[in-house]
Amino acid sequence: MNIIIIAYIAFISLGLPDGLLGVAWPGIKDTFKVSIDSVGLILIFGTAGYMLSSFFSGYIVKKLGIGKLLAFSCFLTSITMLIYSITPFWPLFFIIPVMGGFGAGAIDAGLNTYIAQNHNERAMQWLHASFGIGITAGPIIMTYSIALTGRWQVGYQVVFILQLVLAILFLLTQKLWYSNNKNIEDLVESDHSVTTIISTITHIPSLLSMLMFLLYTGFELGLGLWTYTILTKSRGIDPQLAGIIAGSYWGMFTIGRISAGWYTKKVPLRRIITISLISAIIGVFLLLIDINPIVSVLGITLAGLSIAPIFPGLVSDTKFRVGREHEANTIGMQISAAGLGAAVVPSIAGILARVYGIEAIPLFLLITITLLFLLFIFLKRGTINDV
């Protein structure tokens, strides 16, 4: 089995758990009798583990090796899914994501750095398309688990089994990460010696790049997380149909990333990102104005399709924004910031929903993606533009 195929499978495994929560949350909320914004606790604790491991991804990969880390990460995630499905205690439900987040963070940062340094933009887009496959499957698995059994716990049990199988696969294939007696993790680590973490942290373009990733991932997962709640609790759409629509958001997201792998060689990368951001703004605006359900669904799917190339594009563009000497450090920091955004932005959306109503969420997400667009335009100035 080719290493790049294993990397793609690893990103499918990363996406699977992330797609479950949006559809499961209304049921989880009712089971534990907590408020709508309590989802923020799950996101924050998961992000704590994710950020810690992704920030020090180079060190972790160097110590364990990518092969062992893939197996260990999937095993941690599978145990997290199992505990989700059986625990009757709300505190354990929102604390246990620390474990799954820790395993996911290092894999995310490590494989992003490896692909950025050793493969082309097509490989980067398809790596993240693999994440899209996983996160598209998540809502579908949860929707049909609830439809067939009436229990959200079953969806987590299905993914527990899938993650356990993947952990075994990664354990059996770990030796493939060795080539000509040299660890591929050495390639991931290779540029970290060029400059120190402290130097990168104090580098303004690196800090602004981190902010971009915070805003992007917050928007991406925020819309993915709250789509089901918006459609069922505010727009009156049938739960099973809403689950399919939530899945279609991630489905269009995946199609966008697969197709981006073909056209990135023909269209300048920054032009792709600019057009994608503008289209995403239009999409979430269509969701906000709520003319009718068809327009809302069009907005959701347009947003999913539009944002698809942005994250991998921003990763590939890192060296042009911050300089090659800061690239490896900045990628790890960006992945950490992305994890923070995945917790903070959806959590703020939940608080706004509790205080002002669910329809405050689309407006907040529109502001978020607009800020990202403005920041990207600002960072383009003074850097290499023909990329």
Image: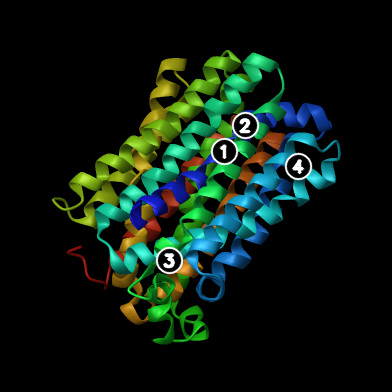
Q: Amino acid at mark 1?
A: Leu
As drawn, the residue found furthest toward the left would be 266
Seen at 16% across and 51% down, the residue is 267
Rounded to the nearest angstrom, the CA distance separating label 3 from label 4 is 35 Å
Question: Circles 1 and 2: CB distance less than 8 Å?
Answer: yes
Count neighbours of disc 1 (C-alpha within 10 A) and say few if under 14, some if 14 to 19, many if 20 or more.
Answer: some
Mark 4 belongs to which amino acid? Answer: Ile
Q: Which quadrant would residue 26 be assigned to in this image?
A: top right
Local packing at callout 2 (Cα closer than 10 Å; few below 14, some 14-19, many 20+) is: some
Residue on which disc 3 sits: 209
Q: Residue at x 55, y 65 (%)?
A: 54
How far is the residue under mark 1 from the one under mark 4?
A: 15 Å
Tag 3: residue type?
Ser
Please tell me whether mark 1 sits on a helix, a strand or a loop. helix
State which tag comes first along the sequence, 1 or 4: 4
Q: Nearer the viewer, mark 3 or mark 4?
A: 4
Q: Give the label on residue 83, or none.
A: 4
